[in-house]
Image (tube, coloured by chain):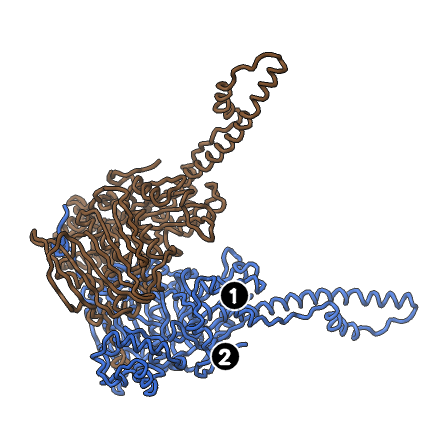
Chain colours: A blue, B brown
Amino acid sequence: MSQNATELFDENFNELTPSEFFRKNKQMLGFTGKIRSLTIVFHELITNSFDAAEEAGILPEINIDLKRVDKEHYILTHSDNGPGIPEDYIMKVYCTMFAGSKFRNIQSRGQQGLGCSGCVLLSQMTTGEPARVISCYEENGELKGVNMKFKMDVKKNKGMLMEKEYIKPEHTGVCIQLHFKDVSYSLSEQGAFEYIRRTMIANPHAKITFRDPSGHKYIFKRAAEIVPVLPKEVLPHPKGVSADDILFMAKHTDKRRYKSMLTTSLSRMSNKRVAEIEEMTGIDMNKRPKDMKWAEAEAIVDSFQKMKFMAPPSNGLIPIGSEQIEKGMKQILKPEFVATLTRKPVTYKGGVSFIVEAGIAYGGDAGRIVNEQRKSEIMRFANRVPLTFDQGSCAITEALKSIDWKRYGLKDLDNTPLTLFVNLISTQVPYLSTGKQSISPEPEIVHEIRQSTMKLARKLQKHIRSKKAAKEKAMRSKVFEDLLPVIIEESAKLGETSVPEYTQVLAKVTKRALAELLGEKVEEEEVEEEEDALIMEELDEFGYAVDEENSSLNSSKDFDDLEIDEEE
Amino acid sequence: MSQNATELFDENFNELTPSEFFRKNKQMLGFTGKIRSLTIVFHELITNSFDAAEEAGILPEINIDLKRVDKEHYILTHSDNGPGIPEDYIMKVYCTMFAGSKFRNIQSRGQQGLGCSGCVLLSQMTTGEPARVISCYEENGELKGVNMKFKMDVKKNKGMLMEKEYIKPEHTGVCIQLHFKDVSYSLSEQGAFEYIRRTMIANPHAKITFRDPSGHKYIFKRAAEIVPVLPKEVLPHPKGVSADDILFMAKHTDKRRYKSMLTTSLSRMSNKRVAEIEEMTGIDMNKRPKDMKWAEAEAIVDSFQKMKFMAPPSNGLIPIGSEQIEKGMKQILKPEFVATLTRKPVTYKGGVSFIVEAGIAYGGDAGRIVNEQRKSEIMRFANRVPLTFDQGSCAITEALKSIDWKRYGLKDLDNTPLTLFVNLISTQVPYLSTGKQSISPEPEIVHEIRQSTMKLARKLQKHIRSKKAAKEKAMRSKVFEDLLPVIIEESAKLGETSVPEYTQVLAKVTKRALAELLGEKVEEEEVEEEEDALIMEELDEFGYAVDEENSSLNSSKDFDDLEIDEEE
C-alpha cells in the first residue's frame, strides 16, 4: 500500500555516520575482491608509515609480518620507526573516518583520513576481532609508550577501548596488529608482494622487511641513504582558488581584515597585490572577513584571473629525482637500457602545481611475464605510491596509450619487454575516487606525462637503433674479416710474392672505414619543436579544449629554481 | 624543522564532516568536468523524483527548465509530482550528507543519501547562491505546502534556513531551484540531453518536459500508461549475510532472543530452520541478542552456508519488462530490428538477487553517429538509471566486450548500426564508486549479461541472414521473371504455337519451387547447450573462478514464480 510523505519519511529516513556509510559501501574504500582487499590494506599502512616517518625527518623502516592462520584468515603485524601517535589520538586515527592530519595543502601520500580506519573496519567486519596498537612517542621531551586494544563503534564513528597498558619504550614508532578473513595473499600483479616491490622502486630511501605467509623473509634494502627532504605546507595559489574557497577562508579565519586574510592565506599575495585588487574591484580591503558576501568573493577571484602571478612556490614538491628513480629501476628490473627524467614543476587547474617524473626500462627483467612471454607494463605512482587498480580511467594510462609508439620504432608495444614508470608529485593529486587508484585526466597532467615519456621514448629509439646498427656492423665486419685474408693470401700466391702483414690494416678498415662506407651514421634528427606543435594538435583531437591563453602548459619559466635532474 | 608526534598531532589533526570531506573531494560525487557535472545534477534530481513518485504509487511526471544566465552560469528549476517532503526533512534531504531514506534493502535508483545534497553543495560552491525548495505534501490527511530558501553549512553538515513561507498547495510534489556555474549544457553522448533520452528508454511510464537553454521545449511522452508496481523491501537472504551483519543486527534489534531476531531479520528463515541451526551449532537460540559474540555469529553464518535455502524472494525486484523495453527502444531508435528480453532472477555473492534485462536494436536510428558514420553504442542502466561515465571498468561493458561477436556474423562490431541495451535490477547494485556510474564485475552478473545478450545476438544473426537470403532470392527470382517469359515466347514462336498463359505458373515457381531448388532453407542450428558449456569455459579463461558448487549460475529454478516475459 502506498503511503503519504510524512509516513514514508517518519518510517524510513535516517542519518548514517561515515563509518556506517562505508561499512555498507566498503567497495568505495577499494575493498573489492580478496586479493585487492589485502593489497589495499598494505597500501594504507605502508603509506601512513612513510608519511609519518618523513614528516618527522626519519628514514622509514617498516617490518611486516603476514601469518596465515587458516585458509583466507590472516594476522597482519605492521610496525614502523615513525614518530608514533600520542595516546589521545590513537583511536581517532584508527576508528574515526574523515579524521586525520592529511587535510593540509602539503605533498603527502595519504590525503583523506580514511585509510587506517578503513583497515580497522575491514578487519572488524571480516573477523570481529579488535585492533591491537602499540604506540611509542615523545611528549615534553619524554619517551612514552602505550599498548591498546579497541574496536570501532560504527554507529558512533569512534573507538571503544577494551584494554590499555602503559609500557616503557626504547624508541618511537607504531605497531598495529589486525586480523583479516576473506582476503588472500597473492604474487600476481595486483597482489601485496608486487605492491611492495613497486613501492621500493619509488622509495629507494626506505627499508621494508616482509615475512610472507610461508615464513620466507624478504629484505628490501635501501638503495639510497638520503635523509628525505621534508615537504613544506604551501599556501594555495590565487589562480587555484574559487569564490567558495575565499568565502570559506573568510568565515574561518582569525584575521581582522580582508587584507591580512588574503596575504596570510594565499601564496604570492603581497600588500601591493591587495592594493591592486582593491583598485580593480572597488572593495574596501579593511573590511571584516566575517562579513564577506559571495559577490565580493567572486569579484576578488575574478580579479585574480586578470592578474599575473608567479607560479606557486614549488618547494612544497619533493620529487624522487631522476637519479634515484634510475637506481630503483636498475636494482629491481636489471634492464638493458634505462632512461629517467624529472620535469620542472607546472600547474593544473590554474594554480595547483605538480611535477611529472618518468622512466623507461627496456630488456632484462623489464616488463612482466604473461604466458612465458615478456609484455610491456605500466607502473603508475602518485606521490611515490603505486597505483594498482582502476588503470583504465587514469591520466597516466590515457597519456601513455595516446602516444603513437610506432613513431618511436615500437611496432608492437604490448609485446615489448618494457616498463614505463610515471610518478605524479603534487600537494593535491586529483584522485577519481575514494580508493585513490586513478588520477583525473586533467589536460595539463596528460600533456606533461606525454611530453616526458616521449622524450624518453626518443632515447630508447636511439638505443634500439644503434644496437641494431652495431649488430649489423659486426656481421658485415665479420664477412670482411673472414674473406679479406683469403683474398690477400690467394693474391700473394698468384703474384708469387710473400703475404704482407695485413692484420693491423684490416682491423682499422673493419672498424672505421667500412662502417662509413656502408653508411652507418645514425641520424640524429631533432624533432622537438615540431613535436610540441603536434602534441597540441593531438591533445586537441583527444578531446581536450586546449585554451592557449589560460593554459599553464608553457608556464614553467615562471617557476622558482629547483634542484632537479632535468634531462635534455 | 621536524616535530615530535605530540606537536604534529596537536597542530594538524582534525576531523571533517561528510560535507567538508566532499567539498574537498567533489570529484568523488561525480563532479568532474563541466559537461559531466551538469549531467550528474540531472541524474540525481531525476532519480530522486522517480523513486519518490513510484514509492508513493504515482506515475512520475517531471518538468525541467534550464536557463542560461551567462556563459557557464545556469539556473535549473526541477519540479515533480511526487509525494513531497515534509517540512522537517527538507533541509536534511538537501543539506545533510549520508542522510536519506535509501538505506533499506529495496530496489531503488538512489542508494546512498548523497545525491541531492551533492547538487546543493555544487551549486553553493560554484555560485554561493542558496537553494530554493517548494515542497507540497500530505500530513494527517491535510495538504500542506512550504517554500524555503537555505544554504548548506558544510562545517556542520546541515542546512541554514534563510527564508520560510507557508503556501496553499494544489497537489503534492517538490520543486527545487539551483544556480550553477562552471558547468555546461551539451548535446554530446555524456551531456544532459542524452541522459534524458536514455532515461526515457528505460522508463516508458514516465513523462519529462524539458526546456533547454535556447528555450526549445521537448516533451518526452509516456509510451506506456502503466501504474508502476511498488517494489517491496526484502529481508536479507541468509546466504548473503556476513558474521558482521548478524552481529550488527543483534546489537540493534528489539527482539529478545536469537530465534526471533533471525526469523524477523532474514528471509527464508523459519522456526524449523532455526532449530536446525541450533542443532548444527549447539548455540542456545533463546539467548539475548545483545550478548551475542563474534564466534557465535560466525558459527551461525557457517551453518547458513551448509544449509539449502530457497533463493531470495524476487517480488522485491520489478524489471521494466521486455515488452516495455521494446516499446521504449522502438519509440526512440526506430530500428529495423529489435529484440529484448528479461531474464529470471538469480543471485550474486550467494544471496543478493538481481535481474538482467537486455535489448538489441539494429538499423534505423540505432547506434550513434560519429563523423557521419553510424557506430555501435552500449546503453548501460542500473535500476532503470542510465550509467553515463566510467564505462571502462563496468560489468556491462566487460561482459559485452567479451562476447565473440564474429560468431554472430558481426565482423566489425564498432562500425555496425547497433544499440546494445542492458539494465541491471537489484535491491543492491554493487557500484564501484560514490559516483554510481559503473557496476562491479561480479562473475554471476557478467555471466547473466553475456547469456542474455548472446541470446539476442542469435536472433539478430537470423534476421541479418534471412534479410541477406531474401535479397539474394529476390535477385534470382528477378532473373527468372525476366528470362522465362522470353524463353516461353521464343519457344512458342519456334514451335509455331500460341503463347500459353504462364503468368500464374511463373509466379508460383518463382515464389516457392525455385527457392527450394536453390537450397535457400535457413539453417536453424540449435547451439544452446554447447554454448552454455562454452560460456563457462570462457568465463573461466576470463579470470573468474567459477565455483560450480557455490555458484548461483544455475540456481534460477529455486526462484518464486514471477510474471516476466521470458524469451526462449
Front residue of A265/A147: it is A265
Amino acid type indicated by mark 1: Ala
In this orientation, does residue A208 appear? Answer: no
Q: Position of residue B544 (x, y in %)?
A: 39, 51
Q: Which subunit holds the residue at mark 2? A: A
- Residue B403: give x, y in percent of width and height: 43, 46
Q: Is residue A430 visible?
A: yes
Answer with left or right where residue B508 lies relative to residue A182.
Answer: right
Residue A285 locus on image (x, y percent) = 26, 84
Is residue A108 or residue B131 the one in the foreground? Answer: B131
Q: Amino acid at mark 2?
A: Asp
Quarter location, residue B564: top left
From the viewer's perspective, is A461 left or right of B508?
Answer: right
Task: Give SS at disc 2.
Answer: loop
Please name whichever residue, A436 or A75, is drawn nearer the observer in this view of the structure. A436
- Reading the image, the residue beneath label 2 is A565
Q: Residue at x 50, y 18 (%)?
A: B505
Q: Quadrant of the N terminus of chain A?
A: top left
The answer to which of marks 2 and 1 sits earlier in the sequence is 1
Q: Secondary structure at mark 1?
A: loop
Quarter of the image where one finds residue A464? bottom right
The reply to whether dot 2 and dot 1 touch (C-beta < 8 Å) is no
- The residue under label 1 is A366
Which residue is at a point 37% across and 59% down the rendered structure image? Answer: A35
